[in-house]
Amino acid sequence: MSSNGNGRQPPQTPKGKQPKEQNDDTFQLSRVFLAFTQLPRVIRLVWSTSPLLTIIMALISFASGFLPALSVWITRGVVDSVITAAFSRTHTLGMVWFFVGAQMVVGLGQNLLSTLSNIAQQLLQERVSNRVQAMILEKANTLDLAFFEDAEFYDKLRNASDESSYKPMSIISQLFDFAKTLVTLFSMLFLLLNLTWWLAVIALLMPIPSFISSTRYGWRGYKKMRRQSPERRRMMYLNRLMTTDTYNKEIKLFSLGHFFINQFKDLAETLYQEDKRIVVRRYLASFAWSSLSAVANSAIYIYVALRAVIGAISIGSLTMYTQAIIQVGSSFQGILGDLSGIYESNLFVDTLYQFLEYQPRIVSPAQPNALQRDSNSPGLAVEFRNVSFTYPGKDPETEAALKNVSFAIKAGEAIALVGRNGAGKTTLVKLLTRLYDPDAGQILIGGRDIREYDIEELRSVVGVIFQDYVTYYMSARENIGVGQIDEIENLELVERAAGKSGANAVITKLHDGYATMLGRWFKDGTQLSGGEWQKVALARAFMRNAPILVLDEPTSSLDAHAEYEIFTKFRLLTEGKTAIFISHRFSTVRLADRIFVIEEGVLKESGSHAELLALDGRYAELFNLQAEAYR
Ligand SMILES: Nc1ncnc2c1ncn2[C@@H]1O[C@H](COP(=O)(O)OP(=O)(O)OP(=O)(O)O)[C@@H](O)[C@H]1O
């Protein structure tokens, strides 16, 4: 995205930290080494998650690396001692027993180590994955609302939480496996060198082409994941549409099921075709290279067999060398496989760290000023001075949401915001609570620019319920208690807040009162009606007990009686706090001390109901239009 000309940048990973692969689709082997740059970070992450489990895994890997060579060496002992026993006259079985016994000990040892390794790995995997998921949530919690409205950010967030949470542990497992196989490789090479050096070299070289090919496909797999991310997200969305209760009604009534299912199937088919190409090519290439290795192994086999025929080596040695050759090849292949696996996982982990590097733009100042409450009023004064704002990616000339808006609200005043859909009313509230910062101008609360306050403190003095309020699928008490999280257990406060909004009458009728689980998602959940949910949300705003109360269409779903109840008692309920409410219902609006009419991002008119009617401007027009409809 380009800058939209108002000086703000859309959310991006900090410049200079993007890995080179981001901008280039071609694969180069040299990049393989670049992609290991995350390794130290990953090791630190896993180590700090559980040093004990990491040490256990490292020790087990190192120890089990020696066992294959030991086993091959013992095999020679078994064969040679059997032949000696068979062809000598004494038939002494002592050595046979010894070597077979040793083989059994090695076998049991191998079994024990792999069991321990599996246990350590699974436990560590779970802890690392949980920790990474928590890190992603923590990061998401710090980021501005604007990030969540950006598709690129969303893709990264999805990729980070879907793929990357288990990848750090894959890297560590592959790294330990790499170390283990390295030990096996060197111990096998040590055995082979007794026979001839060039066989060791050939066995080493064989797996290299296979490594290059597999790394290239790892790269392609990663690029594919990045490319397909928007489609996969769309599939997830369709899946949610089809399986979530809130959408189900409309989908049934509009017969949209097949329409969405077909979209899902089309996307799935396109992705499948792309996946198929990569999978088939990857495994065919791997088949070709491993066939070549098999042929080369047979040639070496013949050479060693002929050495045994002419008596240059014993039959036991024949067995040992042939096994060692095969193991050198497979160990080296294993090492390269681990390397390309680490490389592939690294690419994913890179996405995770790119996500974790996002920095919020809306932050508290280094030295925040404390908010001074007004001693004469339970409310706080609010002022907008020449505030302009355009949403990211929109043109400030033609698509500004607010243009040069100025007004002052006294502490304790009740203000209604009116205006058509899309006029900028909700945007004004978002700016007041620093969900966005204005591009120009200043917003003041209690006489100071809101950017001078700590964000948490600022938000604690503004109680807001948006028109798209959240319906938490939790108990009724929690639904209201979250309005003031440190009082969530205080049933008395919760009940008082519920009493003000009319939610108390709803909740006391439920089978478990305030303990009733709301929503249908969880066991014994009760679904509420739209208006009942709104009363619960409204109670949350009262629970907050903030000096400034902002209600965005707070009574849109309430029945006439409930709305009347709230608004006749509005001043009583708000206890003299500063109140800003947005409403399209003029019966509600006229209760405000003053009314602000917003039109296309501009404050057009302001004054009391009577003043604005007398003005006979836009307000009078809208009011009369609505009144007309009731006649
Ligand atoms: N997150 C967003 N990203 C981009 N544009 C947005 C966003 N939210 C709102 N807008 C645009 O900003 C303008 C003002 O929207 P706003 O939500 O403030 O209107 P409103 O007056 O509250 O409308 P309504 O009465 O329908 O709730 C609209 O043109 C809208 O399309």
Image (cartoon, grey):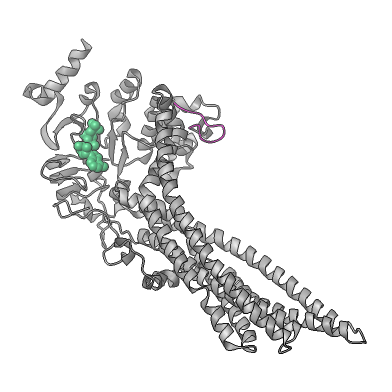
Residue at 90 percent across and 84 percent down: it is 92
Q: How many marks?
A: 0
Residue 500 visible in the shown view: no
Residue at 73 percent across and 84 percent down: it is 309
Q: Is residue 355 left or right of residue 97?
A: left
Write down which quadrant ligand 1 falls in.
Answer: top left
Image spot of residue 577 (x, y percent)? 27, 37
**Image position of 104 with respect to 564: above or below:** below
* Magenta stretch in the rendered image: 519-528
Task: Report the front residue among 277 and 395.
Answer: 277
**Image position of 180 with respect to 236: above or below:** below
Task: Report the front residue among 340 and 80.
Answer: 80
Image spot of residue 133 (x, y percent)? 46, 55
Task: Report the front residue among 331 and 366.
Answer: 331
Q: Is residue 193 left or right of residue 491?
A: right
Q: Main secondary structure of the magenta part?
A: loop
Image spot of residue 499 (x, y percent)? 41, 29
**Residue at the farthest right position:** 90
**Residue 233 falls within the magenta-colored stretch:** no
Residue 380 visible in the shown view: yes
